[in-house]
Image: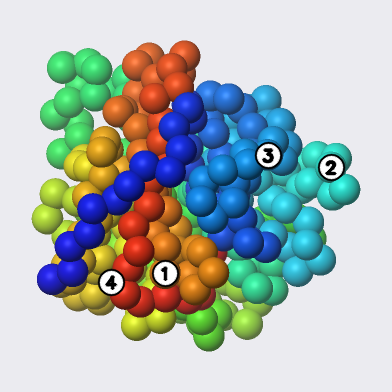
């Protein structure tokens, strides 16, 4: 098994999420600085790309280059064109709690998840923790390139972190509170079918993730200071250790072999919303990134 130790490239984030590699820079959302940022490959030259008052999360680009971003607390997907944000799609009818991660296909179809329930309040309430054994489920929302909802996939257990294979025919998404990765076939219109378990894991809270050229997935385990490389079927073939809990990762750099990891001491807003303890960490791995995001 491959084992790597990440090095800290940048600190001073509040809570980094949704890392994406584009145009030679790492883009990411910072929940509690309420903005999208980018940095160069070395984690330097941080640029404010756009403010998102409703708390940004998942990022993706339409074929024309416009940026889409999930605005979490108001359950919206925003479109940013020439620096101006407008409503792309309101998904509030299908969210059990905050909207969250997203992947956008090469044709411009978006797949947007949400928490489904107030995870952190439940974890703080000892009397409610038993409910985590059978957590509430929620929906995965599919949006066409024009911003219209074309499908709602029910019974998802905290859909979070998602990738699309290089041929554009398969979506793989984490179901965080059920410790698994689920796969769907993607139809010509972007709708999903043939749901199946891609990997059932053991006490791995699957969070932000990316795909490599061997068809394996690097994912953050939101319960530990590690990212894991996982084969279809669930075999773990690699680990990257971080200085604090890992919440999302992305393969980038000039050869797409740098695994960038967004880490934080916690994801609980009561603990971190007013802190700047978030970090970007990185490790060089053997296999380059592939597919989307």
N-terminal of the pair, mark 1 or mark 4, is 4
N-terminal of the pair, mark 2 or mark 3, is 3
Report if residue 124 is visible in the image.
yes
Residue visible at 20% across and 22% down? 128
N-terminal of the pair, mark 2 or mark 4, is 2
Instruction: Read off the residue under disc 3.
Output: 47
Distance of label 4 from label 3 (alpha carbons): 37 Å
Q: Residues within 10 Å of mark 2 (few under 14, many from 20)?
A: few
Tell me the element at label 2.
loop
Tell me the element at label 1.
loop
Instruction: Read off the residue under disc 4.
Output: 198
Name the front one of labels 2 and 3. 3
Distance of label 2 from label 4 (alpha carbons): 38 Å
Distance of label 1 from label 2 (alpha carbons): 30 Å
Tell me the element at label 4.
strand
**Place of residue 277 in the rendered image (x, y in percent of width and height, measured from the top left):** 39, 25
Instruction: Read off the residue under disc 1.
Output: 257
Q: Which mark is residue 83?
A: 2
Report if residue 193 is visible in the image.
no
């Amino acid at each position: 098994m491959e084992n790597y130790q990440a090095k800290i490239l940048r600190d001073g984030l509040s809570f980094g999420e949704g890392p994406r590699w584009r145009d030679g820079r790492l883009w990411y959302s910072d929940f509690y600085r309420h903005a999208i940022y980018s940095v160069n490959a070395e984690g330097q030259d941080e640029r404010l790309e756009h403010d998102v008052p409703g708390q940004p999360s998942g990022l993706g680009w339409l074929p024309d280059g416009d940026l889409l971003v999930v605005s979490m607390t108001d359950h919206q997907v925003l479109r940013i064109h020439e620096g101006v944000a407008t409503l792309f799609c309101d998904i509030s009818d299908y969210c059990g709690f905050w909207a969250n991660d997203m992947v956008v296909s090469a044709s411009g179809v978006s797949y947007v998840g949400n928490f489904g329930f107030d995870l952190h309040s439940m974890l703080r309430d000892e009397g409610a923790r038993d409910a985590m054994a059978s957590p509430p489920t929620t929906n995965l929302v599919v949006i066409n390139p024009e911003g219209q909802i074309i499908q709602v996939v029910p019974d998802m257990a905290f859909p979070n972190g998602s990738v699309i294979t290089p041929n554009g025919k398969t979506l793989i998404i984490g179901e965080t509170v059920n410790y698994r990765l689920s796969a769907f076939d993607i139809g010509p219109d972007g709708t999903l079918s043939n749901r199946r378990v891609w990997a059932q894991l053991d006490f791995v809270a699957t969070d932000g993730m990316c795909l490599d050229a061997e068809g394996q997935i690097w994912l953050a385990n939101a319960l530990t200071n590690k990212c894991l490389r996982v084969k279809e079927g669930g075999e773990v073939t690699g680990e990257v250790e971080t200085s604090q809990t890992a919440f999302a990762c992305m393969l980038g750099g000039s050869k797409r072999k740098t695994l960038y990891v967004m880490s934080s001491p916690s994801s609980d807003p009561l603990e971190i919303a007013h802190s700047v303890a978030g970090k970007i960490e990185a490790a060089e791995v053997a296999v380059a990134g592939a597919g989307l995001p």
